[in-house]
Amino acid sequence: MKYIEVNNFFQNSDLIVDLSKNLDFYSFDKHPETTSIGRYAGKRSLQLHNLYPEFFESLCYGVISHLIDFSKVGSCDWRVSSYFSIVNSDDNVEDIAVIHQDIDVLYAGVVYLSKNLDINSGTSLYKKENKSYIKEYEFINEFNKMIMYDASIPHGINKFVDNRLSLLFFIKDLQYSLLTS
C-alpha cells in the first residue's frame, strides 16, 4: 500500500470536531507525553486513547479496516497513537523539517477537520533523488477526508495556513491472523 484516500470518513464529523474544542494543545517541546512524541510543527493534544478510549478504538477499527478485511480475520492486534493537531501559518519553523519520514511507524495518516480551508494545505508524498525531494503525489485538504500512507515515504504539509485542524494517527504495529476454513 502506497496510500489510501477516503472521503467522508466520519459519519458525524461535526461531533469529532467538537471533541477537539475543549482540549489543551502542546508544542513538541512542551508536550507532557514526551516519550511518545517526536518533533513536529504546530500543536497536538494528548493521545486520544487517554482522552476518549471508546472513540479511539472506533477510529482504529475504521482506519485499519482500509488495510485488512475484518470479515476474514480471526484475531487482530494493533499499536496506534493518535492526536488532534492544530497548525497555523506561523508554525513553519526552520529547525523542524517539513518533509520528513516517520520512524518506527508502519502507516501514518491524517483526517482533515477544518471546513473551508485552503485545499492546497494538504499533504504531499515525495521521493528523494540525490539530495532533493520530488513531489510524487499531493492530497488536497478537504473536510472529513482521511488519508493514509506508508510512513517511510517522505511526506509533509503542503502549505501552512491558520486553524488547520486534523486528527493524526500512526500505526506502529499491526498483527493479525486469518480465519481458517
Image: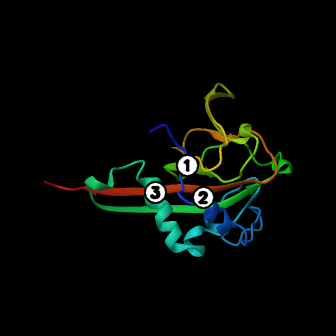
Which amino acid, by three-letter code, is at mark 1? Asn
Residue annotated with mark 3: 62
Q: Are marks 2 and 1 in contact (CB under 8 Å)?
A: yes
Q: Could you say which disc has been placed on residue 8 in the image?
A: 1
Which amino acid, by three-letter code, is at mark 2? Ser
Where in the figure is residue 84, as x and y percent of width and height? 66, 61
Q: Could you say which disc has been placed on residue 111 in the image?
A: none
Q: Report the residue at 65% width, 25% height from top.
A: 130
Q: In the drawing, does residue 110 fall left or right of residue 122?
A: left
Reading the chain from its start, which is encountered first: label 3 or label 2? 2
Where in the figure is residue 95, as x and y percent of width and height? 80, 48
Q: Report the residue at 36% width, 50% height from top.
A: 68
Q: In the drawing, does residue 3 fall left or right of residue 98?
A: left
Q: Residues within 10 Å of mark 3 (few under 14, many from 20)?
A: few
Q: In the drawing, does residue 109 fall left or right of residue 26?
A: left
Residue annotated with mark 2: 13
Q: Are marks 3 and 2 in contact (CB under 8 Å)?
A: no
Q: Is residue 37 visible?
A: no
Reading the chain from its start, which is encountered first: label 3 or label 1? 1
Q: Quadrant of residue 94?
A: top right
